[in-house]
Amino acid sequence: MSCVPLLLGMFYGGFHLALWNDAFLPRAESMLWRVSAVELLAMPVAIVMLCVIATAITLTNDSRKRRKQEKRDKEAAVKKEKRKGIPAIDRTRTPLNSPATTCS
């Protein structure tokens, strides 16, 4: 997602905020201008915050799903090995963290 439209929206809102104390004839027009100026500035910020939150939630859910699937796969492999009568293999041990072997 490109940041350019959001930045342009913020500059547009900032331009309207610059005219906060401009002389408007009716008070209602002045209030409408101020409300719209704050909204124009705040909306791009809110969009960015929502995108960051949504991305964080998605990444968290994906990692949880991946861990659950890995656990299911490991359990299925253990069940399959038990059915065949083969002892379960500890797949967490790698050559780097296995006990050192000595040569005679």
Image: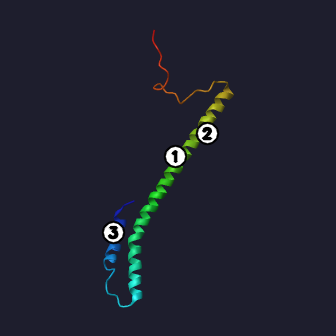
Crowding at mark 2 (Cα within 10 Å: few <14, some 14-19, many 20+): few
Amino acid type at mark 3? Leu
- Figure quadrant of the N terminus: bottom left
Q: How is the image coloured?
A: rainbow
Q: Name the residue: 31% across, 77% down.
A: 18
Q: Which residue is mark 2?
A: 72
| Residue under label 1 | 63
Q: Nearer the viewer, residue 50 or 2?
A: 50
Q: CA distance from mark 2 to mark 1?
A: 14 Å
In the image, taking residue 102 as reference, residue 78 lies left or right, namely: right
Residue placed under numbered mark 3 in the picture: 8
Callout 2 amino acid: Arg
Q: Relative to residue 69, is residue 58 depicted above or below?
A: below
Q: Residue furthest bottom?
A: 25
Q: Position of residue 86 (x, y in %)?
A: 64, 24
Task: Name the residue located 37 percent from the left edge and 66 percent from the top edge.
Answer: 6
Q: Tell me if 14 is positioned left or right of 93 in this view.
A: left
Quick one: 29 or 83, which is closer to the camera? 29
First-in-chain label (2 vs 1): 1
Q: Amino acid at mark 1?
A: Ser
Q: Which quarter of the picture shows residue 41? A: bottom left
- CA distance for labels 3 and 1: 35 Å
Taking 8 as reference, is 60 above or below it? above
Residue at 44% across / 58% down in the picture?
A: 52
Helix, strand or loop at mark 3? helix
The local secondary structure at tag 1 comes to helix
Label 3 vs 1, first from the N-terminus: 3
Query: Which one is earlier in the sequence, the residue at label 3 or at label 2?
Result: 3
Q: CA distance from mark 3 to mark 2?
A: 48 Å
* Residue 99 against residue 29 in the figure, above or below: above
Element on which disc 2 rests: helix
Q: Quadrant of the C terminus?
A: top left
